[in-house]
Image (cartoon, rainbow, N blue to C red):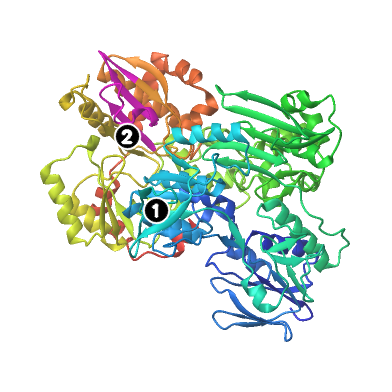
Amino acid sequence: MNGRNKLVLIGNGMAGIRTLEHLLKLAPDKYEITVFGEEPHPNYNRIMLSSVLAGGTSVNDIILNDYAWYEENDIRLYTGDPVTEINTLKKTVTSSSGIIESYDQLIFATGSKAFILPLPGANKEGVIGFRNIKDCEMMLESSQKYKKAAVIGGGLLGLEAARGLLNLGMEVTVIHNSEYVMNRQLDEPASIMLRQELEQQGMKFLVNKHTKEVTGRKRVNGIRFSDGERMEVDLVVMAVGILPNILLAKETGLVTKRGIIVNDHMETSIKDVYAVGECAEHNGITYGLVAPLYEQGSVLAKHLSGVGHQGYHGSVTSTKLKVSGVDVFSAGDYLDSADTRSIRYQDEVEGVYKKIVVRGDRLVGAVLFGDTSDGPSLFSIIRSAESVTGREKEILLGMKMEGPSGGAKILEMSEDEIVCGCNGVTKKKIVDAIGQGCHSVAEVKNCTKASGSCGGCKPMVEQLLTAYAGEEAAIKSKEGICSCTSLDREGIITGIKEMGLKTVKEVMYVMGWNEPEGCTKCRPALNYYLGMIWPGEYVDEKESRYTNERYHANIQKDGTFSVVPRIYGGVTSPSELKKIAEVAEKYEVPMVKFTGGQRLDLLGVKKKDLPSMWEDLAMPSGHAYGKTLRTVKTCVGSTFCRFGTQDAIALGIRLEKAFERLNTPHKVKMAVSGCPRNCAESIIKDFGVVAIDGAWELYVGGNGGIKVRAGELLCTVKTEDEVIEWAGAFIQYYREQASWSERTSHWLDRVGLVSIKEALADSVFRSELVARLKETLEHTVDPWKEIVENKELRKNFEPLNRLELTHE
């Protein structure tokens, strides 16, 4: 590293690391780089925190640059060790742990922090912001102990926090000081449609409310409003905005206002000190969206590498978001004013709203709700400042990229148009990557990170591949199951069957995997496909399973596990309850919780105690940890309820006993309701049964997760035997046709209910499916019992290796 300039980056977030990525491409040998980060994590995608909170994504999934990336690029990284002092005369920085590093060039990328309202009681326990992984962890912990949450702020962060807390089982009220939620991103009609959708998901709202005080002694127990009203809460999440982190910059002597003042080269008021990202203020503006921050990083990288550039001159911003499963988009001046004209399209049946705003002959703003596919094109027209006179209606209703003119439309996009908003990837970057040989979505993603976060831009990436790489790439653009292979599910399954492949390593070798050992995405998928195709011959490869499935219990963030014994149909007995209580006491279980599936969850179990605990329980595994049948929830039905028309409990127990231990592409939940009042929530299960007079209605594809989806009616049958038959056929058809890790709801959206109905209506085919399902079940065993009775397997349950958490 001798002869290199020393570059120190303060802040390990998205803007600063993106600057380094550009710099390493432009001048890979010019700098010796050191990075100090306040959080104990490598660089991660802060935009995806809401997905982590909602339960659809793990922390590992949102890592943008893992520790190996820093090592490969000779970057010295200090995590959990923020810089606390800077001497600009000696050109040194000092960290909180006492590390002193000298620099030639210094970059501030300290980001921002959640703004906490200066209210009486705001410093109480249970009052937090929503800005980082630690905030997510605190919300997860609170949800296990408390029930009522309030989110102050009806903007994007507030609504995402509320959605996540709902998923964690809390009662959530959003408090907003305006009449309309997301009033900074949406106009009134779009805001109303969004609120209606969120209320259907279970979110509550208090609008035009101003919080006056947070009440409670040590911990929050309520909120008092300026109108005198009070509400009881156990957790308060403040999502009312962000403040640039500029305290260290002020102490260093940099000129600051709201942020650190920078010029067009991202230079601060002190020589060789730069600022980029949310902490920087350029021409009086601080930006909180990722695209402008990446534009700043690109300019700064060019400046530091000595490459010619035109400087940073500010950004025109757009916002494309997914709020609790609902797509919204806004750009420019989307609110009406005296000097603007607007055109609107609203379809409340389909949940679609579109609006464009014109000033003079120029498009200056747009709002989209429900269908945001036109967003990039509209944003491009706004930025180009071209005349739209006479084309207003065409622009509002005819901007689709799909269809015969799709290639022409995609070619007309400007080069600097942002395609991937999550990672700030422009059309030019993608086209350049295609020109350099990236001819599949996976290859483009690896090269540019486009489609690597929320995936919303994937269709446009595919269209760019088709337009710029020809028909051959259009065929290849169908993404493989992971970056290790270009093969999709169908290609892999066909190969396994035709060549008689029987092990994971055999599949990867014969089918030409890019990575000979595979990865954590493809290995579990291959393990499942092999077991599904060869149930009597394939031996389950434990090392290709996730930690939860290897140890047959849900791992918690502190390294302990939760144990959920199976309780068929939610029905238990006094003796069984007594046994569970005695086992919980014996192993000093810190918490026993009722789950949403009518079972008991024993939380905080040490890994070494798992086999002995299962032995003492002498109950089957509840499979709460795997991609299997989880539960069959029941109401009391005709056994006790005066409204019940059928015996829901008996059928629920029968279903659960029929299909327990069965591996599936994703977790499967069932429910049986004894009458149309649906007390067992059958309509939002993967397979739901609802009793009507003299018959059973069978619903499929329901989901109560991030995006609530009502199940669709598959058929109506008269007997319990028919319910079991159709349930078995549906599950096996799902097992054979769905992709690994694809929920029944997503599979149903992809293939359509009609095709499933047509397939299962054939009684011969239905019988064949049930027969294959029974064959698979004959080869399954209860994993807890197997481990209890096998001394060699019990040896695996030593104290947890923490690396398993990192690399899963």
Residue in the foreground of this view, choosing between 107 and 737: 107
Question: Is 689 part of what is drawn in magenta?
Answer: yes
- The amino acid on which the numbered mark 2 sits, given as a three-letter code, is Leu
Residue 124: in sight, yes or no? yes
x and y, in percent, of residue 772 in the image? 38, 27
x and y, in percent, of residue 95 in the image? 59, 79
Residue 771: in sight, yes or no? no
How crowded pointer 1 is (Cα within 10 Å; few <14, some 14-19, many 20+) is rated as many
x and y, in percent, of residue 127 in the image? 43, 59
Q: Which residues are magenta?
A: 668-697
Disc 2/disc 1 C-alpha distance (Å):
53 Å
The residue pinned by badge 1 equals 223
Q: Which mark is residue 777?
A: 2
Residue in the foreground of this view, choosing between 565 and 351: 351
Q: Mark 2 and mark 1 in contact? Answer it, CB < 8 Å.
A: no
Question: Is 551 part of what is drawn in magenta?
Answer: no
How crowded pointer 2 is (Cα within 10 Å; few <14, some 14-19, many 20+) is rated as some
